[in-house]
């Protein structure tokens, strides 16, 4: 092997890379938040009485789960332009990840709702609780416990998916900043291995934080 | 002459890309499954620390974005003087990535077989390999197959990421057609439909198997 590794420039640009990490976490959090809202709506759409809503939700979920996330990001970035909607790379990436996650989360929520026996809600109602009180005190606390870990998993997937921002020219997230530095220096292996380490640390920090929050939240 | 539209030739070009996607998926699933079964059996049978260490190493491949792994492998191969084309590198990275997931599926499936059943098999005079082939394999298959089908479909979809290192698979082919025709919505729609037609029937078979086997 006659290649000499140059690590110093990589470590010197570490502040830039760490700034990229922040953007990566931001996109992941934002897209997961949007995906949770969409996922809840889709899950309710599937079980609702309305045929149109059920088919619409089913179409969304199946398209989201059976095509690559990258294709969905391309749709947001290149495809929507034909309809006159021009998203920048940041918005297109966030929208693509949110679309993809929402399809998976909808199925998770639907499974969670089915896991809570309907008799509990009926019992709560017959004790004189209103519909809102039933949701607030009986159904939602249990549902939240069931879907908590799948949501955190989905958020870690979202972190990993943010690297796809490279393909739509995003240059502010971790992968994008790394690529910018790479095209300046052609030290591809050095820069991307440090990026890989940073991604690993982000994923592990998130898992750790999720466990800590769960430990605090689900004590009783 | 200057009014380019999507022609039959473009569709054929994309179908050829779809064949590359299927080729990538085939090698990735084959390699990933072979490695995954090996590592999974190791993880299920090794004692605490070595098993945990293997799990931690494989966890790296699940915690780093696949695109970064592809870029790294593509940059690393020439550094150590290995001359491989993009397709081969893509297959290797996808196979290792798949193995990391397959290992956990195999481990969970093997551990789902009750230890008492395996002890009973051994006490009937079956050897370790008899037990594995005749007792563990059929029982673990039922637990693991739905997850494995999901993994195979995941690899099919993730194979789109290798466009970054210049492999002309379905999505890259679509991108080339878009550059020529300037019809992104239509072309991406066709590419999406092809992915969907490959993935959806297999996903449905997986769900059907899962339901059927749960009832039994």
Image (tube, coloured by chain):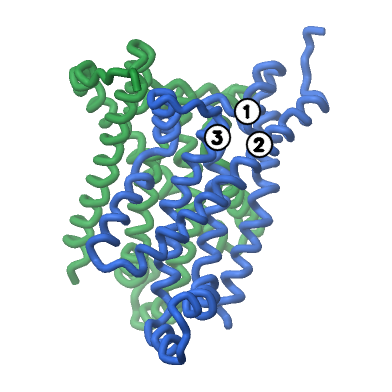
Chain colours: A green, B blue
Mark 3 against mark 1, which lies toward the viewer?
3
Q: Nearer the viewer, residue A186 or B3?
A: A186
Q: Nearer the viewer, residue A217 or B75?
A: B75
In the picture of the structure, the residue carrying the numbered disc 2 is B20
Picture disc at residue B88? 3
Q: Quadrant of residue B206?
A: bottom right
B53 over B175 or under it: above or below? below
A160 over B214 or under it: above or below? above
Residue at point 45% right, 39% down? A97
In the picture of the structure, the residue carrying the numbered disc 1 is B168
Q: Quadrant of residue B125?
A: bottom left
- Marks 2 and 3, how far apart in space? 12 Å
Residues at discs 2 and 3 both on one chain? yes
In percent of width and height, residue B189 lies at 68, 35
N-terminal label among 2 and 3: 2
In percent of width and height, residue A158 lies at 39, 42
Residue at point 58% right, 73% down? B211
Q: Residue furthest top?
A: B2
Inspect this view and state whether residue A212 appears: yes
N-terminal label among 1 and 2: 2
Mark 2 against mark 3, which lies toward the viewer?
3
Q: Quadrant of residue A78?
A: top right
SS for callout 1: loop
N-terminal label among 3 and 1: 3
């Amino acid at each position: 092997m006659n290649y000499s590794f140059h690590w110093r420039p990589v470590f010197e640009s570490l502040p830039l890379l760490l700034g990229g990490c922040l953007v990566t976490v931001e996109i992941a959090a934002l897209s997961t938040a949007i995906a949770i809202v969409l996922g809840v709506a889709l899950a309710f759409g599937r079980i609702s009485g309305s045929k149109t809503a059920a088919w619409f939700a089913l179409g969304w979920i199946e398209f989201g789960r059976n095509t690559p996330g990258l294709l969905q990001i391309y749709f947001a970035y290149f495809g929507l332009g034909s309809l006159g909607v021009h998203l920048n790379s940041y918005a297109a990436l966030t929208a693509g990840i949110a679309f993809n996650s929402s399809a998976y989360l909808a199925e998770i929520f639907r499974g969670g709702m089915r896991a809570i026996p309907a008799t509990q809600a009926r019992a709560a109602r017959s004790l004189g609780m209103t519909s809102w009180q039933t949701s607030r005190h009986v159904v939602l606390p249990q549902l939240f416990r069931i879907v908590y870990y799948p949501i955190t998993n989905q958020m870690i997937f979202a972190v990993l998916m943010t690297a796809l921002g490279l393909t739509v020219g995003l240059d502010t997230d971790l992968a994008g900043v790394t690529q910018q530095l790479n095209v300046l220096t052609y030290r591809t292996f050095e820069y991307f291995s440090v990026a890989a380490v940073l991604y690993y640390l982000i994923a592990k920090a998130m898992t750790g934080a999720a466990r800590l929050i769960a430990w605090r939240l689900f004590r009783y | 002459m200057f009014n380019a539209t999507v022609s039959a030739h473009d569709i054929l070009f994309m179908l050829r890309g779809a064949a590359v996607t299927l080729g990538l998926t085939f090698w990735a699933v084959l390699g990933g499954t072979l490695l995954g079964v090996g590592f999974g059996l190791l993880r299920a049978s090794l004692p605490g620390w070595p098993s945990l260490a293997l799990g931690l190493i494989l966890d790296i491949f699940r915690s780093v974005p696949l695109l970064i792994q592809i870029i790294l492998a593509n940059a690393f191969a020439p550094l150590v003087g290995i001359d491989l084309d993009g397709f081969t590198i893509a297959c290797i990275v996808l196979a290792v990535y798949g193995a990391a997931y397959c290992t956990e599926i195999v481990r969970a499936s093997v551990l789902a077989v009750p230890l008492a059943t395996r002890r009973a098999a051994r006490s009937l005079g079956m050897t370790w390999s008899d037990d594995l082939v005749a007792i563990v394999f059929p029982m673990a298959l039922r637990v693991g197959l739905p997850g494995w089908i999901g993994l195979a479909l995941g690899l099919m979809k993730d194979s789109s990421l290798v466009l970054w290192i210049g492999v002309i698979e379905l999505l890259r082919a679509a991108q080339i057609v878009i550059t020529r025709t300037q019809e992104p919505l239509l072309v991406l729609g066709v590419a999406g439909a092809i992915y969907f037609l490959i993935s959806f029937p297999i996903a449905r078979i997986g769900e059907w198997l899962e339901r059927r086997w749960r009832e039994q």
